[in-house]
Image: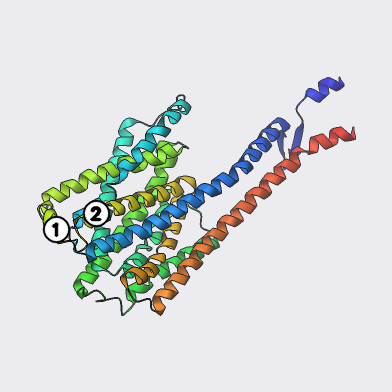
């Protein structure tokens, strides 16, 4: 009887609910595995964040360099934002075989749903990128980059509607501060005409940049929604597929616009008149395309790992770095308003990061509590 009793699963009563100790052991085992994965998760987060910061800063600065040295083609400036996707294909091919082996018994999403999703995302990406190209043409780099951070407010709204995003005081504080930081320069009296642009074109630049920010805010939320409801996959291959397919559609859409507008006819002349030379013209475009793909990997990776709102917070936090770099490379003014905007952005980022630190502490406390409860039956056995 004693041995038979020992083989029986223990029952723990807590809060009126009966829980099998075998389930607790399973939970504890999963918690231990989760704890071991914490380090690799933070490494991935650090890599994605670095990709967002470096790719975004380099892409915006190279885009301004293209315009400053004689580039005038809006469609070409748009095209380089996603035409670099072929560099991801070899890596995708290497990983996809492993994914097939793991996902043989997993229900795959409907092909028509995937086609519609990638087609919609690609067209939206092309439209947003074209608006951003107009904004970068008519605005100083510092003003453009900080206005771009307004997409955080749009993304917060869409995340609340589509992704059931919960707002804590720290997150609200982060959103408010980052939004103030991003819009501060819009009303800065010295922002207009810094680059010889008329007030009308400056206004067009602001409107296009804000419109593109709204579009990207929506796209980030839709991307998270797709990961959760359509793709339902937990592999990095899914991230690569998302980037490759939507970039392919966006590239096709932009090429159609390039040829319909007949701006392709002026590309040869633009290459010859580029101030840094023809080879530098190609190098600028290639580096810009590579930088944007680096940013895309980081941004979508953060959506995959955490949420669209978190990815947008990281992106918005990196934008204030651009005005500092613009001062170094393009000799732009770094006045008091820009310094304040930069400090506010860093503060907002720290507030959001602190919220995730609190969430991590709460998660670890819950795991510890589960382990302590699972030990109660063993202690009772020792007493008997």
Q: Is residue 370 visible?
A: yes
The residue under the point 39% across, 50% down is: 221
Q: Position of residue 92 (x, y in %)?
A: 38, 36
| Residue indicated by mark 1 | 272
In terms of secondary structure, where does tag 2 sit? helix
Q: Position of residue 193 (x, y in %)?
A: 24, 76
Q: Are marks 1 and 2 in contact (CB under 8 Å)?
A: no
The residue under the point 33% across, 36% down is: 114
Question: Looking at the figure, which quarter contains the N terminus?
Answer: top right
Tell me: residue 48, above or below residue 205. Answer: above
The label nearer to you, 1 versus 2, is 1
Q: Position of residue 151 (x, y in %)?
A: 37, 60
Give 216 or 318, whichever is nearer the viewer.
318
Tell me: residue 363, above or below residue 24. Answer: below
Earlier sequence position, callout 1 versus callout 2: 2
Check the image and tell me how it is coloured: rainbow
| Residue indicated by mark 2 | 78
Give 309 or 4, whichever is nearer the viewer.
309
Q: Position of residue 257 (x, y in %)?
A: 16, 50
């Amino acid at each position: 009887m004693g041995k038979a009793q020992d083989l029986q699963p223990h029952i723990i009563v807590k809060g009126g609910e009966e829980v099998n100790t075998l389930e607790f052991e399973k939970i504890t085992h999963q918690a231990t595995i989760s704890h071991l994965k914490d380090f690799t998760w933070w490494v991935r987060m650090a890599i994605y964040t670095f990709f967002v910061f470096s790719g975004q800063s380099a892409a915006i600065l190279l885009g301004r360099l293209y315009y400053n040295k004689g580039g005038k083609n809006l469609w070409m400036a748009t095209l380089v934002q996603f035409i670099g996707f072929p560099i991801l294909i070899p890596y995708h091919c290497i990983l996809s075989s492993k994914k097939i082996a793991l996902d043989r018994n997993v229900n795959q999403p409907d092909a028509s749903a995937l086609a519609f999703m990638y087609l919609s995302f690609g067209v939206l990406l092309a439209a947003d990128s074209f608006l951003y190209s107009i904004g970068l043409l008519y605005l100083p780099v510092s003003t453009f980059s900080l206005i771009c951070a307004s997409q955080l407010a749009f993304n917060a709204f869409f995340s609340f509607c589509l992704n059931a995003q919960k707002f804590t005081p720290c997150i609200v504080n982060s959103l408010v501060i980052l939004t103030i930081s991003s819009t501060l320069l819009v009303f800065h009296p010295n922002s207009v005409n810094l680059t010889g642009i008329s007030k009308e074109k400056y206004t067009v630049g602001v409107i296009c940049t804000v419109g593109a920010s709204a579009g990207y805010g929506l796209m980030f939320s839709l991307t998270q929604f797709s990961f959760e409801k359509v793709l339902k996959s937990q592999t990095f291959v899914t991230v690569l597929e998302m980037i490759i397919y939507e970039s392919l559609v966006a590239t096709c859409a932009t090429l159609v616009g390039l040829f319909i507008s007949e701006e392709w006819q002026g590309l040869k002349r633009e290459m010859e008149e580029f101030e840094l030379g023809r080879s530098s013209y190609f190098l600028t475009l290639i580096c810009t395309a590579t930088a944007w793909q680096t940013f895309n990997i980081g941004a979508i990776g953060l959506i995959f790992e955490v949420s669209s709102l978190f990815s947008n917070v990281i992106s918005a936090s990196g934008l204030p770095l651009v005005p500092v770099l613009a001062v170094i490379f393009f000799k732009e003014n770094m006045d008091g308003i820009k310094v304040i905007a930069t400090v506010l952005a860093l503060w907002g980022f720290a507030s959001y990061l602190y919220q995730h630190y609190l969430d991590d502490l709460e998660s670890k406390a819950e795991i510890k509590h589960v382990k302590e409860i699972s030990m109660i039956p063993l202690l009772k056995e020792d007493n008997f």
